[in-house]
Amino acid sequence: MPYPPTWPNPWGSGDPKPQPGLPWENPEGSVPADAYKYACCNDPFRPLTFAIPTSNQYGDATGVVGRAVYFSPVFDFRPELKGLFGPTPTAQPIRGRSGSYGAGIYLTMQFVGVAATAALNIRVWSLEYGHIFDPAGLQLLGTREDATGEFYDASGTSGEANSCVITLSAPEGLRFWRGGLCVDYTTGTIDDAPTSLLIGSFCG
């Protein structure tokens, strides 16, 4: 049996609409067909790219020498609703507790290569964006939160450890949500930006 199951019925019974409740039922025509079954999402590790900030879009850039921003995919906590409100949204389906939207879902972001940043006076800020029904209209939720302590608790002032983890908890009541991190440093020049600092994430 293929996965995800194809539409119509993969068993080839000729029935154009499988009976309600069967695993491959897809009354809303969502893509992928069984999107509501996905329970997690991995975003592979990749290097952070630093640049001189030219605006305060992700926070006050005063004194910031280099800034890098990471965002998770946009998550859809009610993928079974796809097809009900116009075109199918382009968002990663994640299954939370039944009927509770994102409750119980965590986004865990891991840095690798932390030791190389020990002399740069790194500041890390967490960001969350969400919308109740429009994945293209995500809004900043509240204000950015200082997560520097979580970064340096792992790396230490001596830069001995090489990895740390920062976790965000999805709010309840939103259909679409994404998390992210803004990483600033305030010493040296843009040429001192770490080139081996990687970040990846897991949501589920």
Image (spheres, rainbow, N blue to C red):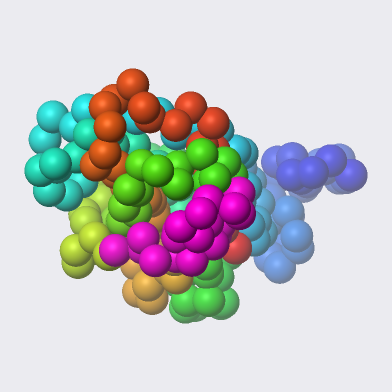
143 left or right of 36 in image: left
Front in this rendered view, residue 155 or 104: 155
Picture layout, residue 186 above or below residue 110: above
Relative height, residue 106 to residue 151 (above, below): below
Instruction: Tell me what residue is drawn at x 73 percent, y 54 percent.
Output: 24
Q: In this rendered view, identify the residue nearer to me: 50 or 132.
A: 50
Q: Residue at x 50, y 60 (%)?
A: 156
Rendered-image quadrant of the C terminus: bottom right
Residue 146 spot, x, y in % from top left:
29, 63
- In the displayed structure, 174 sits above or below 86; it is below
Q: Is residue 22 visible?
A: yes
Q: Position of residue 65 (x, y in %)?
A: 22, 34
Q: Residue 53's x, y, as percent?
A: 19, 32
Between 6 and 119, which is closer to the camera in this rendering?
A: 119
Residue 159 colored magenta? yes
Give, as a single range, the part of the protein colored magenta. Answer: 146-166
Task: Determine whether, in the image, residue 109 is placed left or right of residue 33.
Answer: left
Task: Report whether 172 appears left or right of 36.
Answer: left
